[in-house]
């Protein structure tokens, strides 16, 4: 089982991968419609919004949490 390098989501099935391509290292939630991976800032914004919706944190706290989570992921190690 692979884990998305951009968000950490487990990718078990082809439909979990970007464009259904099991060779990709990132998931369907971290790609653009053409299959390219989102930028750091796009992913940060997306993850911040996800945390606000699912955990009820305010935007500032969610943004800090998202940055901390992303700092541990391979795609963003140099950010």
Image: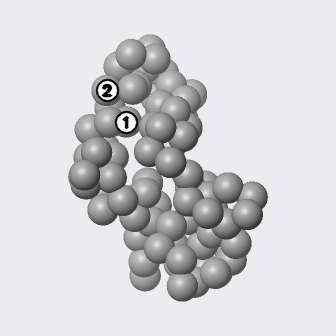
Query: Circle 2 sits in a helix, a strand or a loop, which is it?
Result: helix
Q: Which mark is residue 47?
A: none
Tell me which corner region of the image, top left, top right, bottom left or bottom right, holds residue 67: top left
- Rounded to the nearest angstrom, the CA distance separating label 1 from label 2 is 5 Å
CB within 8 Å, label 1 to label 2: yes
The residue under label 1 is 66
Q: Which residue is located at x 43 percent, y 57 percent?
A: 6
Q: Quadrant of the C terminus?
A: top left
Left/right of residue 62 with respect to residue 12 in the rendered view: left
Q: Quadrant of the N terminus?
A: bottom left
Q: Position of residue 28 (x, y in %)?
A: 63, 62
The residue under label 2 is 64
Q: Which of 75/64 is in front? A: 75
Q: Report crowding for label 1: few under 14, some 14 to 19, many 20 or more residues within 10 A (C-alpha).
A: many
Left/right of residue 48 with respect to residue 37 in the rendered view: left
Query: Circle 1 sits in a helix, a strand or a loop, which is it?
Result: helix
Q: Position of residue 5 (x, y in %)?
A: 40, 64
Q: Which residue is located at x 70 percent, y 72 percent?
A: 19
């Amino acid at each position: 089982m692979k884990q998305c390098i951009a968000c950490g989501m487990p990718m078990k099935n082809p439909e979990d991968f970007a464009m259904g391509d099991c060779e990709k290292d990132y998931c369907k939630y971290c790609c653009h419609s053409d299959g390219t991976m989102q930028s750091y800032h796009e992913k940060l914004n997306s993850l911040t919004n996800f945390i606000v919706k699912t955990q009820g944190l305010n935007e500032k706290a969610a943004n800090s949490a998202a940055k901390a989570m992303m700092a541990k992921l391979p795609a963003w190690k140099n950010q």
